[in-house]
Image: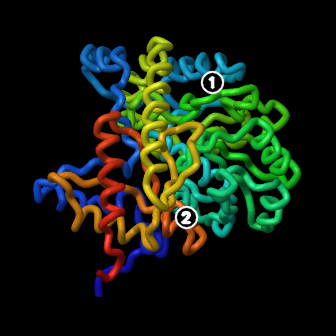
Amino acid sequence: MPASLSQRARHLPASAIRRLVPLAVEAKARGVHVHHLNIGQPDVWSPSIVIDAMHDYDERLIAYTMSRGVPAYVDVLREYYAAYGVALTADQINVTSGGSEALLFTLMAVLDPGDEILIPEPYYTNYTSFAQMAGGSVVPVTTTMDEGFRLPPVARIEAALTPKTRAILLCNPSNPTGVVYTRSEIESVAALCAKHDLWLVVDEVYREFVFEPGPETLRTALALEAYADRVVVVDSVSKRFSMCGARVGCVVSRHEGLMRALLRLSDARLSPPAVGQALAMHAYHAPESYLEQAVETYRARRDLAFAKLADIPGARAVLPGGAFYMIAKLPVADSLHFGSWLLTDFARDGETVMVAPAGGFYATPGLGDDEVRLAFVIDLEPLSRAMDLLAEALRVYPGPGK
């Protein structure tokens, strides 16, 4: 009899974003061009200063770095946060191997086996995996398209707390909805965390991508000084500078005990990527116009995708305020079947489109079955074509079992 797998390994959920990849590979093998709206891989080029630094990289030995990150890079991050009015010391920043490790380490530091973390759904599907890897579980608080995916009233959030709740996790701007929470919304959740002695973890990977900033825009939860002892921010260069493959993120908190725990976790895995940090250091010295142009690019794509979706009978969405995603409700009963069918049975002029079925972004069974997440991370012309293909596919889709 073969050795058995752990309960953890057996029960980790499949990726809602990548589960249809084998079907896409098969479609491409048949000569079909697949327009990828399923994954948040930007096509905006990384800053030229980063590419130049990569070409000029001349270290003869790629060695370990300090566990919490290269000191010079930590100082760059301190300067970056200072521009948002947040003064940090070096030991309040812990560099990680991407935002994924930042999230995993944070949950490992705040959850014991059996503990719970409260998250508004729909949410980034890998939060479930990270929570389970840390021995905990996700308790969802449902947000709806009809309510603009805004945070529910605090009383509803509070009603979902249990004696096992240890933290509340927000993503701002949100992956997958594109909603941008206001300062008052986040502050009310922070006050709830203080009332019940909980951590407030905020994933701010899409911080710069806010399309219509206003006086209520809170760029970072670290600015909530009254709650500095419980706010934990997760960050990354992956989306900000189109450097997903560099694998450089960080955790930021003013809680000394948490940062000591994160350092012990970091010591155990030795170091974050040396080359990635060397490149990320340059990214933060890119001209301001780089991020300004990136925001304009994603805003134009958002507007096109949203307008195209509005022309599809039976489809609807909430206009995203940030990031580069939207949850779209489609006239289908089973978006997983529809997403699969797009790759196995549908093509026009040798092209099809790939979407992410939204059921995997919910913890509540049955929710998201008629929704998909669309990532507007391709240029306007192919994006327009992809949306037209989606509309055509919905016109001819026969439904499950046909």
Q: Residue at x 72, y 51 (%)?
A: 151
Residue tagged 1 = 90
Quarter residue 392 falls in: bottom left
Above/below status of 233 relative to 32: above
Q: Which is more toward the observer, 163 or 365?
A: 365
Mark 2 or 1: in front is 2
Q: Which is more toward the observer, 224 or 355?
A: 355
The amino acid at mark 1 is: Ala
Tag of residue 363: none
Residue 390 spot, x, y in % from top left: 34, 55
Quarter residue 42 falls in: top left
Tag of residue 132: 2
Total marks drawn?
Answer: 2
Q: Residues within 10 Å of mark 1 (few under 14, many from 20)?
A: some
Q: Is residue 105 visible?
A: no
Residue 109 spot, x, y in % from top left: 64, 51
- Image quadrant for the N terminus? bottom left
Q: Which is more toward the observer, 360 or 254?
A: 360
- Outermost residue toward the right? 195
Q: Earlier in the sequence, mark 2 or mark 1?
A: 1
- Image quadrant for the C terminus? bottom left
Residue 49 spot, x, y in % from top left: 36, 14
Question: In the shown orientation, is residue 99 left or right of residue 2?
Answer: right
Q: Is residue 137 visible?
A: yes
Q: Residue at x 25, y 62 (%)?
A: 343
